[in-house]
Image (spheres, rainbow, N blue to C red):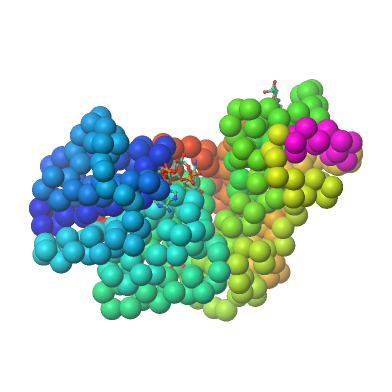
Amino acid sequence: MSPSQNKDILVGIVGVGLVGGELVKQILSINKAKNPFKIVLLSSSRKALYTSPENAITDSEGWKAKFDASAEKAELSKFGGYLAGLVAQGKGRKAVIVDNTSSEDVARLYPEWIAQGLSVATPNKKAFSGEKKTWDAILAASDSEGGGRWLNESTVGAGLPVINTLKEMLGSGDKVKKIEGVFSGTMSYIFNNFSAASSDAPKPVFSEVVKVAREKGYTEPHPADDLNGFDVARKLTILARTVSALSHSQTKLPELESFLDVQTQSLIPAPLEGLASGDEFVGKLPGFDEEFNKLREEAAKEGQVLRFVGVVDVEAGVVKAGLEKYPVTHPFATSLGGSDNIIMFHTERYSPRPLIVQGAGAGAAVTAMGVLGDLLKLV
Ligand SMILES: NC(=O)c1ccc[n+]([C@@H]2O[C@H](COP(=O)([O-])OP(=O)(O)OC[C@H]3O[C@@H](n4cnc5c(N)ncnc54)[C@H](OP(=O)(O)O)[C@@H]3O)[C@@H](O)[C@H]2O)c1
Ligand SMILES: *[C@@H]1O[C@H](CO)[C@@H](O)[C@H](O)[C@H]1NC(C)=O
Ligand SMILES: *[C@@H]1O[C@H](CO)[C@@H](O)[C@H](O)[C@H]1NC(C)=O
Ligand SMILES: *[C@@H]1O[C@H](CO)[C@@H](O)[C@H](O)[C@H]1NC(C)=O
């Protein structure tokens, strides 16, 4: 890293909640003499704080009060112009926008920002797993002369080295045969508890596990938003697109128009489909415990557990998410705790034994680390 002052990297952070706040803290914790990052823009959905590079945010305690006191309204359409303007004023400067929202509106602006020469780093899965035309527009913008970079490491597995590992494998010519894993922290928590590997573990009913997970904040306020499997489908879309884009030869993988093209098994009981209230959903879920008990018993008879997994089967040309059975000795059964993610890469080189990445796949500290790791690639 060269600490030359005119190599400033200006940072704009859209979304300053948990991860955004943690990211500010981590950026400011870098040794001042070596810190190329200058935070010059912060925004929530309502307000924004703009500063000049000379007055960039440096106070890891005081920034929040300064932000709260700002009278500027958040206007997404202004951010790109503001940062591009600052870049134009300083030789050698770069700028990056961090999107820590889960907003589609923000994601839709990526192509414009990247075309302006700004880089975009984000844990937000929406842009990369939504409509293929958005993805193509981002790709075209970053390929164009003077286009910025798009940094997507933390979209899958938060801070876990998943996308980067995949890029290095593919870039160096390894052939990916299959990626399979537990990609949702919520589903991980639910099934680690509901279908434990140890036969002495308690056997709670499914609805109770979901209820407790919701009370502990592991699920979305409406648990159907987790049980529909869409979060996993979005992550698989990102992996599958990356495999297709970076493989040295044509793959059999389907061209996904969006994450809706992933074969996804929803765990929402059909009669509860479309219930607007999370409370009502949780209240009615016990009516379906018997079905889940049966699945668990069938698996147990075969010495297996249930896990909600995502699979990108490159050899078979299949991308799918759903409930599968694994032997009680399998890493998906034995090595997961809490809301851990685990991802297995079966490749030509990592064969017959796969490469395995495992650890916390959510949480502000590790997600912010994943984003900051991306920012360091710009140095
Ligand atoms: N939590 C984790 O451990 C984790 C792990 C991996 C990935 N992620 C990803 O990280 C992202 C953030 O997650 P989240 O669930 O916390 O998101 P969220 O609650 O929807 O977004 C939080 C922040 O984004 C701001 N925001 C929303 N829409 C905006 C807009 N149109 N313009 C400007 N700011 C806007 C909100 O502002 P207000 O405060 O004004 O509403 C808020 O500060 C998501 O993409 C998520 O998938 C999270
Ligand atoms: C950022 O991400 C974290 C983790 O998902 C979330 O809790 C927070 O609200 C997000 N938004 C901001 C603005 O940090
Ligand atoms: C499942 O969760 C309950 C409630 O938090 C806990 O008492 C129990 O030990 C957990 N079981 C397993 C196998 O993790
Ligand atoms: C992630 O970003 C890289 C560029 O750094 C790109 O090649 C890859 O296709 C991207 N993947 C997705 C799906 O966002």
Q: Is residue 287 magenta?
A: yes
The location of residue 29, given as percent across then percent down, is 25, 36
Left-right relation of 184 to 33:
right
Main secondary structure type of the part rendered in magenta: helix
Please report the residue visible at 57 percent of the width from the left and 56 percent of the height from the top: 235
Residue 261 in view in this figure: yes
Point out the image quarter for the C terminus: bottom left
Numbered range of the magenta stretch: 280-292
- Foreground pick, 96 / 242: 96
Please report the residue visible at 48 percent of the width from the left and 54 percent of the height from the top: 103
Left-right relation of 9 to 259:
left
Q: Is residue 298 above or below residue 179?
A: above
The location of residue 191, given as percent across then percent down, is 71, 37
Please report the residue visible at 26 percent of the width from the left and 74 percent of the height from the top: 146
Q: Is residue 76 magenta?
A: no
Q: Is residue 32 above or below residue 228?
A: above
